[in-house]
Image: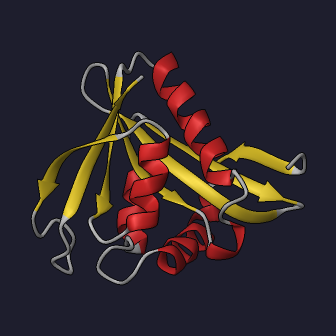
Amino acid sequence: MKEIKFRPYRESDLPLLHQMDCSCFPPGIAYSLEELGAFIRHPGAFTLVAEIRGEMIGFIVAHREKEHLGHIVTLDIPAEWRRRQIGTLLMNKAEEWLKRNSCRMVYLEAAVDNHPAIRFYEKHGYQSRQRLEGYYSDGTTALILAKTL
């Protein structure tokens, strides 16, 4: 999709990104406005927005954490934009940023019942490493998936 543009996050994006997060994830898994803002403003954060003709169609938030470790905090693509390579493009850009920032490994969490997301991450080289019982505020268990960069 040639018309996709990627740009850095702007503070004015936060309400729309939060709305998108709430449309992508159920209550208890979606972030509150305050949580999402804190993740985006975290030192060592990378937030990239995907747009087509000025319409936001997805975003990713990643962190450079401890030495050589990256974390994909969230990857949000509204249902109507899925299966068009937007998630792959955002993931690739975040992983490239993490590599440039000395990360050798990246991890993320996914709800155990979010089978499409788990398949997506596995397709991109992530492997399940651990279960976190009751990880989400609604009590849902998460899987930690990780990948060597």
Asked if 41 appears above or below 17 in the picture, the reply is above
Asked if 11 appears above or below 146 in the picture, the reply is below
Name the residue at 82% across, 50% down.
4
Q: Quadrant of the C terminus?
A: top left
Name the residue at 43% across, 72% down.
33
Displayed quadrant of residue 118 = bottom left
Name the residue at 54% across, 36% down.
94
Asked if 112 appears above or below 123 in the picture, the reply is below
Name the residue at 72% across, 44% down.
7
Q: How many marks?
A: 0
**In the displayed structure image, the side of residue 25 where residue 112 appears, left or right:** left
- Decide if residue 41 is in sight here: no
Q: Position of residue 113 (x, y in %)?
A: 30, 72
Q: Position of residue 135 (x, y in %)?
A: 16, 65
Displayed quadrant of residue 53 = bottom right
Q: Position of residue 143 (x, y in %)?
A: 23, 55
Displayed quadrant of residue 84 = bottom right
**In the displayed structure image, the side of residue 91 where residue 143 appears, left or right:** left
Say which of 46 and 84 sits in front.
84
- Decide if residue 22 is in sight here: yes
Q: Position of residue 67 (x, y in %)?
A: 26, 20
